[in-house]
Amino acid sequence: MGANGIESDIRDRHLNAHERATANLEFAGWIDGETYAGTDQFAPRDPVTDDPIVDVAMCTSTDVDTAVDAAWDAFDDEWSTAGPADRAAAIREWAGVLADHLEELTLLESLDTGKPIGDARGEVEGMIRTLEYYASLARTQRGAHVPTGEDVHLYTRHEPFGVVGGIVPWNFPAWVAAWKLGPALAAGNTAVLKPAKATPLTTIRIAQLSKAIFPDGVINVVPGSGAGVGGAIADHDGIRKVSFTGSSAVGRQVMERAAETVTPVTLELGSKSPFIVFPDADLDRAANAVADGIFYSTGEICDAFSRAIVHEDVYDEFLDRFLEIARSHVIGDPLDPETTLGPLTTASQYETVSEYIDTGQREGATLAFGGGRPDDPDLEDGWYVEPTVFTDVTPEMRIAREEIFGPVQTVLSFSEYDEAIEMANDTEYGLAAGIGTERTSLAHNAAADLEAGVVYVNEYGPILPDAPYGGVKQSGVGRDLGEEALDHYRQTKTVYTNIDEPSL
C-alpha cells in the first residue's frame, strides 16, 4: 500500500511483472538436468514493493550431496571425454539460447535485484558475452613441451579438477554466474552452483535453459541458505575447487572450511576503492567516472569508488561537478526506462547503509547531499536511499575505511602525490582503484604504485571478459575472467617419458 492506503501504480506494475516473469516456471534446484524440489521453500522479495516474487525451493546440504554425485556421474560418463571443440560448441549454443531469452532474463534480474531495467539488460548481455568468450577459449588451451636432454621427452598437460563449486553474490547474480561457469566448463569441469538466497531467479533460469545442450549433471544449481548450502559446497570432499564472490567476512569462512579438505579457492571479496583526482584531470570525466563507480547499481558493487581523493587545487570545482551529477539521478521504479537509481536489494542492506550515513554524521563529516529516502509516497515500501555525499572526511573515519555497499560517497583531499598514494593504499582492501589525469606518465606511475588488482584510468569500467578481475590483500585471492581464470579450473600434470637410443 502507498501512504494513503491505495494500491500504487508501481505496485500494480510489479505484481503484474511478477506474474509475467514467472508464469509456467518452477523455481527450484536444478540437478542432473531436471528441476529438483527441496524440502522447504522461501520467496525472494521485490526490493521496490517488498512483496514476495515467487516461491523457490530451499535446498539443504543433503541436496548438495545429490548435486555433487550427479556432477561426478556427468563428468565420468561424458563430459571428461568431450573434446575442446565439443565443449566450445555447447557453451556457444547455450549463450545463443540465453540471448534468445534476453528480455525474460532481464526482467527477472531487475525484479530480483532492483536494478534499473537498462542496467539489468546490460548485465545479462555481459553474462552472454562472458560465455561466448569462454566458448572461444575452450579450443585454445595448450600444454607445453619442455626442452631437455635427448633421452627424455618432457611435456605438460592441463586437466580439469572434475567437480567444482561456485557461490554467487546477490548483487550481480546473472553476470557472476557466468564468471564461474564459463571458465569451469571451458576447462572441462562440471559444476555445482549456489545462487544468493536474496536473488536466485536468473541463476536458476539460465540453468533450466541449458537443458539438452549439456549432458545432464554438467550444470547443477542448488538454492538455499549460506550456512546450509554454501557451507556444504565449501567443505564438500567431492568438490575439488571452490570459487566465491561476496563479502570478506564470509570469504574467510569459505577459505577456512575449504582448508579442511585442502580445496583450492578463488575469492573475490570486498573493497574500499579509491579514485585519485590529480590537479591536471579533466574534471568532467573524473566526476562522471567517480559517479559511475559509486551510483551504478545503487553502489552495491564490489569495486565501488567509495573514496574520492581529490587534489586541493581542484577540490571545490570537482565537488561542484560531482554534486550536480548526484542531483541529476532519477530515483524511481526500475521498470521505468527513465530511472537511473533503483532501491537497495534487501532490507538488511538498507539498514546497513542507513546506519553508516548516521555514523558519518556522528563522526563529524559534512553531509553535503542526500542521506535520506526519496520524497515519493509510491516508493515508500522500497529500500531506497538517495545518492549521498560526505565532505570534510578524514581517513580514520569509519565511512572512509569500511565497505558501505551503497550509494554513499566520501570526498577527501590531498596536496602531494605521495600523500595521495599513501591515502589510497591505507586500507585492508585492494580490489580496484581509479586515476583521473591527462598525463600518461602520471597514470602509469600511479597505476604501478596503487595496491589494487584492477586500475581504471579516467573511467569506471567497463569490465570485459578478456581481462582478469580480482583483488589483493583482503579483497581476495585468485582471479575471475580472462585467460588466467582457466588456470584456476584446471591442474597441470608433468609427464616424463624416457627415450632409449633408437635401434633396429
Image (cartoon, rainbow, N blue to C red):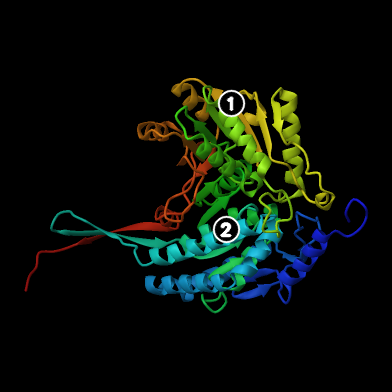
Q: Quadrant of residue 5?
A: bottom right
Q: Secondary structure at mark 1?
A: helix
For the residue pair 247 and 250, the one nearer the viewer reads as 247
Q: Which residue is mark 1?
A: 316
Q: Residue furthest top?
A: 415
Is 310 left, or right, of 358 in this rendering? left
Q: Residue furthest bottom?
A: 212
Secondary structure, mark 2, is helix
Return the mark for residue 123.
2
Vertical order, 4 against 443 (above or below): below
Q: Amino acid at mark 2?
A: Glu
Residue 428 x, y percent position in the rendering: 55, 32
Q: Quadrant of the N terminus?
A: bottom right
Dot 1 amino acid type? Asp
Quadrant of residue 212 within the rendered picture: bottom right
Instruction: Identify which residue is drawn at 46% across, 56% down.
Output: 465
Query: Where is residue 364 drawn, in percent x and y?
Result: 71, 22
Q: Is residue 465 visible?
A: yes
Disc nearer the start of the sequence (2/1): 2
Closer to the camera, 87 or 101? 101
Residue 97 image-quadrant placement? bottom right
